[in-house]
Amino acid sequence: AAYGLSGAVFHAPLISAHPGFCLKKVLSRSGNQQAKKKYPVEVVQDFRDILNDSEIELVVINTPEHTHYALGREALLAGKNVIVEKAFTTKVQEADDLIAIAQDQGKILSVYQNSRWHGDFLTVQKIIEEKLLGKLVHYESHFDRFRNFIQPNSWKEEPHPGRGSLYNLGSHMIDQVLVLFGWPQALYADIRIERPNGKVDDSFELMLDYPDLKVTLKSSYLVREPGPRYILHGTDGSFIKYGTDPQEASLKAGDSPYQENYGVEPANKWGKLNTQLNGLHFEGTVETIQASYLGFYENIWEAIRYQKELLVKPEQARNTIKIIQAAIKSNEEGRKIFLE
């Protein structure tokens, strides 16, 4: 694992906390020793130092998106189990190739779709499963931020394959929709660069068609006053949810994922449900389900040690890339794309 934001916040704290893992080596091509200040690890500057270590069973690829395919391929061929940070790859063909290599090698390949372990998403999933809104007709999800400048010296702002909001934030939102509703019939996308001097997309609206259901996914870097995170409407009622999952802020603050209140959302962030339940009108808040990203790593550990089924299958992550590529085509051609 590299030790940028992804490594420092989303991977190292979870790997080091889980008793089934031992964080052994961190890649830093610049030789930055930051990881050693917090963990008993060896910092290496050459990826091969990780691949050539026979004690290492699992490699996390959390480098820039355009490197995921090459590094993931190298790690799988070296006989390692591999987790790739989202977005999985920049192209569907790259994803298919990694999936085939993992199967040939008999190794685990998964993608860090950690937003499946967001408390608000788990709550939305439960509301849909329990049909608390009757027949769902509209699902809308937002992932908005306010950053009205181009971050200097950031690789995320440079126009390489796999860059921009659709690959970065859209990967989360699309994965959640595929988990909830499966494969859509068609899509339409509007992808834009809204910030002055921007080089990668920082705004998108993606509409997915399902039988009797409209799905809308929206993201922008120019939202100073946040709207709802989720908006669901059905034949019996609505569910509206503001706020973002607390886990990222908690991990940044150095909290342990094993703390009792980890992943607990304050009551003032709970979503509002207004619906008809068993003939009675109900209007009130719904406590957000407590969630933990450790669920992802627990499943990886069980898959490696006990051959348990992967929760985030690489084929699912490949389908997310397929949606992204179709969205890019829709935006370029200004039309609805029908999906196979």
Image (tube, rainbow, N blue to C red):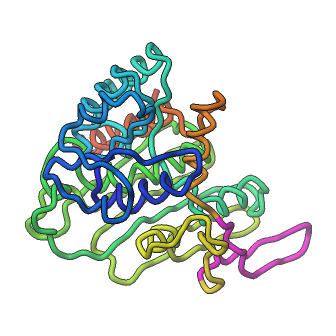
313 up-or-down from 179: above or below: above
Task: Look at the image and say whether residue 260 sits in the magenta stretch.
Answer: no
Q: Position of residue 120 (x, y in %)?
A: 60, 66
Q: Is residue 340 visible?
A: yes
Q: Which residues are magenta?
A: 269-290
Q: In the displayed image of the protein, which residue is found farthest to the bottom?
A: 268
Position in image of residue 34 (x %, y %): 26, 62
Drawn side of residue 267 relative to residue 184, left or right: right
- Give the total of numbered labels: 0
Q: Is residue 21 above or below residue 39?
A: above
Image location (x, y in percent) of residue 92 = 34, 29
Residue 178 lies in quadrant = top right
Residue 336 visible within the image: no
Q: Which percent across, then down, holds residue 211?
A: 61, 42
Residue in the image at 51% along x and 68% along y: 247
Furthest-top residue in view?
104
State the residue at coordinates (29%, 37%). Answer: 68
Q: Is residue 31 left or right of residue 13?
A: left
Q: Is 4 on the left or on the right of 206, as rendered?
A: left
Q: Quadrant of residue 164?
A: bottom left
Q: Residue at point 65% right, 70% down?
A: 239
As displayed, is residue 193 above or below residue 160?
below
Camera-side residue of 6 and 185: 6
- Magenta stretch: dominant SS? strand
Which quadrant of the structure image shows residue 46? Answer: top left
| Nearer to us in this view, 249 or 267 | 249
In magenta segment, residue 279: yes
**Residue at 22% over, 56% down:** 201
Residue situated in front as seen by the camera: 231 or 20 = 20
